Amino acid sequence: SSGINAEYGEREEKRRQTHNEVERRRRGKINGWIRKLAEMVPNCKDELGVKQQRGHPAATRDTNGQGVKSNCGVLQKTVNFIQELQIAHSQVVERLQEQNQVLVEMAKVRENLKRVEQENQLFRSQLQTHGIEPIEYSSMKQQNTI
């Protein structure tokens, strides 16, 4: 019976060690991604300090020997930064839409100007056909009669 208990205890210890190693690797990956976020997000470098954990000096290092960040602080600043980017993106999209609207209006004005210039040319031709010499716009402008 004690042999079975010992074998069961060894199996449990091995299972626990395997679980601990898997968990340690998982935390290491998470900390690695959080470290990358801290490097990418503005004003997040100050979160790179070492967390104080009472009585566990080894626990203040991640699996790569790096100081553990304030993960919550890094994540909070990352979320804030993403929200700021989303707002800025919305503003840029809105401005682009406004600019496109202005470009459409400008195209309409150009088309209208072209039509008016053609009409003006037609009227000038009709005036000349009837013996009336039209006044040039540039000479009227110089005389300030407009």
Image (cartoon, grey):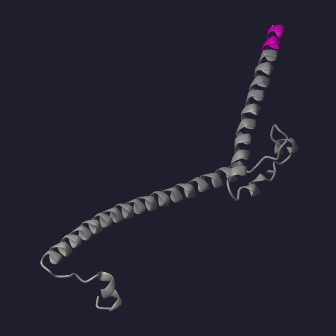
Residue range of the region highlighted in magenta in the rendering: 2-8
Image position of 145 with respect to 129: above or below: below
Q: Position of residue 54 (x, y in %)?
A: 83, 48
Quarter of image, res 25: top right
Q: Position of residue 50 (x, y in %)?
A: 81, 51
Say which residue appears at 29% left-offset and 69% top-offset.
Answer: 113
Image position of 58 with respect to 70: above or below: above
Q: Say which of 59 and 46 sits in front.
A: 46
- Whether residue 6 sits left or right of residue 23 in the image: it is right
Total count of labels: 0
- The magenta stretch spans residue 6: yes
Say which residue appears at 17% left-offset and 77% top-offset.
Answer: 128
- Whether residue 26 sits left or right of residue 81 in the image: it is right
Q: Residue furthest left?
A: 130
Q: Position of residue 73 (x, y in %)?
A: 69, 53
- Whether residue 14 sits left or right of residue 114 in the image: it is right
- Quarter of the image with the N terminus is top right
Q: Position of residue 144 (x, y in %)?
A: 32, 91
Say which residue appears at 75% left-offset and 37% top-offset.
Answer: 28
Image position of 129 with respect to 18: above or below: below
Q: Say which of 125 and 33 sits in front.
A: 125
- Quarter of the image with the C terminus is bottom left
Say which residue appears at 18% left-offset and 74% top-offset.
Answer: 123
- The magenta stretch spans residue 32: no
Q: Say which of 36 and 137 sits in front.
A: 137
Quarter of image, res 126: bottom left
Magenta region, main secondary structure: helix
